[in-house]
Amino acid sequence: MLHPIIKAFFHHDSSTLTYIVHCQRTKKCCVIDAALDYDIYSGDISSSPLEEITHYIMTNELDVEWLLETHAHADHVTGARQLKEKVGGTIAVGVGIRDVQQSVKTMLHLKDDVLTTHVFDRLLEDGQSLELGDLTINVIATPGHTPDSLTYVIGNSAFVGDTLFMPDSGSARCDFPSGSAATLYQSIQRIYQLGDNTRLFMCHDYRPQGRELAYITTVAEQKQHNIQINASVSEQEYVQIRETRDAKLAIPRLLYPALQVNIRGGYLPAPEDNGQCYIKMPMQLI
Ligand SMILES: [Fe+2]
């Protein structure tokens, strides 16, 4: 089995890991889950987190083939669109993005134009494979956190998005629209079936109790030690653990701006007649 070369970048503001994965011989690469900075107070978006990513691509003379999203993120604005403008590449996301678009449209009473999938270059389905030089990217649908969630398997490395976190942190929340703890349980079983030695690359690490940043684990370690979903946890137990935890979680700080950009493939909402783009947020008296 051919193994990829993997480089991780940490986006501090959202605790997101971005990965560049490349084929040693052909230098073809994919970038998984690039993030931008977003200032919640001003609405300013900055592509400065992409600088070290593009620097790495340039200095290693990589040829960007794919800009992959593991899902429509609710905690950061995707950097895939800006990256495509800088270094090229095909933006791909799970076909379940249609469900996410529909949910966000309903939640925020958006116009129908948000439902277009033409803003993405490719919609990916479970079981598809993509070429990356001498490597193959195998696509596994792993919904539950969101309906569009995908895991990308390259060699013996799996990029699991927001399914699992490191063993001391458990798993991703399932309380977003169209999320489901039972579905995530089944998705995680599929990841566990990849085999004990499969390396798992996290999309987030929140460094519990101030421990060092960690983002690589294995199926074996997760099955033994995951605090929410090790091998001895039943679906029923997991759903109860997950839903109890989700009930206590605050809404992500960037939920509304992030989703409104990310379901549009990284484009901002259409400008109003004064030329300015705006985001919507629900308000209610409680
Ligand atoms: Fe997420």
Image (cartoon, rainbow, N blue to C red):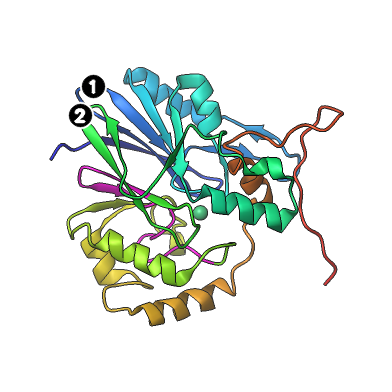
Most common SS among magenta residues = loop
Quarter occupied by residue 40: top right
Up the image or down, 150 lies above or below 182; here it is: above
Q: Residue at x 42, y 22 (%)?
A: 55
- Residue labelled 2 has its Cβ within 8 Å of some atom of ligand 1: no
Q: Residue at x 28, y 32 (%)?
A: 131
What amino acid type should be assigned to the residue bearing mark 2? Answer: Asp
What amino acid type should be assigned to the residue bearing mark 1? Answer: Thr
Q: Does residue 198 appear to the left or right of 281 in the view shown?
A: left
In magenta, the rendered stretch is 151-174
Quarter occupied by residue 124: top left
Counting other residues with Cα less than 10 Å from the Cα at mark 2, is it few (<14), some (14-19), or many (20 or more)?
A: some
Q: Which residue is mark 2?
A: 134
The N terminus: image quadrant = top left
Helix, strand or loop status at disc 1? loop
Nearer to us in this view, 133 or 226: 133
Whether residue 263 is visible, yes or no, is yes
The C terminus: image quadrant = bottom right
Callout 1–callout 2 Cβ contact below 8 Å: yes
Q: Which residue is mark 1?
A: 26
Up the image or down, 87 lies above or below 11; here it is: above
Counting other residues with Cα less than 10 Å from the Cα at mark 1, is it few (<14), some (14-19), or many (20 or more)?
A: few
Q: Alpha carbon of mark 1 to alpha carbon of mark 2: how far?
A: 7 Å
Whether residue 72 is visible, yes or no, is no
Q: Does residue 160 appear to the left or right of 272 in the view shown?
A: left
| Percent of width and height locating residue 128 | 32, 43
| Percent of width and height locating residue 228 | 38, 73
| Percent of width and height locating residue 6 | 29, 37
Up the image or down, 242 lies above or below 196; here it is: below
Of the numbered discs 1 and 2, the one sitting upstream in the chain is 1
